[in-house]
Amino acid sequence: MLGFAWVCISVVVVAFGRIEVRASAPIGRRTRRLRRLLWLSLLMKVAVGAWWYPLGAPLASLALLLGVGLTLIEFGLIFYWLYPIERTERELPATAREYLIARLGMVWDALAPIAAFGLGALTLDYLWSGESRAAGAWGALTVSAMGLGALLSGLSISRRATPFPARCLPVRAHFLEEAQRLGRELGVTVREIVVLDGTRLRRADAFALSGGRIALTDYLLASLTEQQILAVIAHEVAHLAQRKRLVRLWLLTLAGGVGGAVVVAPFAHQLPPWGLLVWLGLIAFALMLPMQRLRRRHEREADAFAVSQYGVEALQGALRVIATLHQREPDHSSDAVHPSLTQRLQALQKFTR
Ligand SMILES: [Zn+2]
């Protein structure tokens, strides 16, 4: 029955997605709305899923995997429809397969924490309740599979190699030397600048990766001036230096979440579905809010650092070019962490005074 309810939700989501894909709007607005649709789809599934509680940990894990699978199918279909439109409008050289892998990778980024956290909590619940021991060999097998699923989803968050395929392009030595100098200034080691293939998907992006690496897409390198590229590098070096603080807060909130779950676990089975839903919502909110706030602050600090090194114009110019290339709307932020272009340019303007 739960499966049937979720399939109904999927049909509705796909129908809305189809309308959104066909709307005549810039790609930036359409992808922003599709992101909202993704969260709506997840919220509806959680709300309906809580109604079937208590389901028992192994069945609940299966349900969780089903939900993740359905969401990937929904957005796989929607992006399959969006591909020919975006290919024409933005002149993408990417094949449908490359496009879908990149787009679904972003959907998986939203799903992975839910899968990791959900499977982890269910595994612990199954172990602590003693039900896994009571089920004998079958229980041991189930609990290992659930634990492995939680571990793999968790690893995919922290160990993702690069968001786009890497290219064997040497970046100019001058950029790496500058990045290393900036790193020394902030007390962080910059080991490498990786060039990613952004041309096929027309992505001008930069990332701070694990292991002291910074990634820039070739499309970004080709679209910005040297000063603008340096400003972007400075922004990412600042993110590398902020990583320790972020990991510390992440561990702290995780410990808080586990602590909260342990306190409520003995009563969880007596809670009505809505009680559980409220409780899950509170945990998710309490875990996400401090992280979100810190990451927003980090964005402002990284911008300030880039300005301190290369001036306001370089970063402002880079942000304008990137927003135009991605057809982003200036007054809407493209994700939950970065402010909109207008807000960001205004904040930078303060430095000129
Ligand atoms: Zn940033």
Image: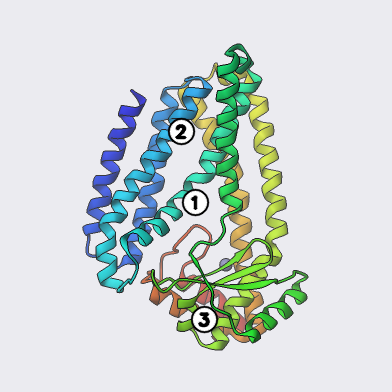
Left or right: 100 with respect to 346? left
Q: Which residue is mark 1?
A: 109
Q: Earlier in the sequence, mark 1 or mark 2?
A: 2
Q: Does dot 1 land on a helix, a strand or a loop?
A: helix
Q: Does dot 3 land on a helix, a strand or a loop?
A: helix
Q: Which residue is mark 2?
A: 64
Q: Which residue does the image show at 56% across and 55% down from the upper left?
A: 160
Q: In x, y percent, where is residue 9?
A: 31, 36
Q: Which residue does the image show at 70% across and 72% down from the upper left?
A: 190
Residue 107 drawn above or below residue 269:
below
Q: Residues within 10 Å of mark 1 (few under 14, many from 20)?
A: some
Q: Residues within 10 Å of mark 3 (few under 14, many from 20)?
A: many
Quadrant that contains the C terminus: bottom right
The amino acid sitting under disc 2 is Leu
Q: In the picture, residue 82 is in which quadrant?
A: bottom left
The amino acid sitting under disc 3 is Gln
Q: Total marks drawn?
A: 3
Q: In x, y percent, where is residue 337?
A: 53, 60
Which quadrant of the picture is home to ligand 1?
bottom right
The amino acid sitting under disc 1 is Asp
Can residue 275 be seen here? The reply is yes
Asked if ligand 1 lies within 8 A of label 2, the reply is: no
Q: Earlier in the sequence, mark 3 or mark 2?
A: 2
Viewer-nearest of discs 3 and 1: 1
Q: Which residue is mark 3?
A: 316
Residue 262 drawn above or below residue 115:
above
Left or right: 127 with respect to 102? right
| Contact (Cβ within 8 Å) of mark 3 with mark 2 | no
Quadrant that contains the N terminus: top left
Q: Earlier in the sequence, mark 3 or mark 1?
A: 1
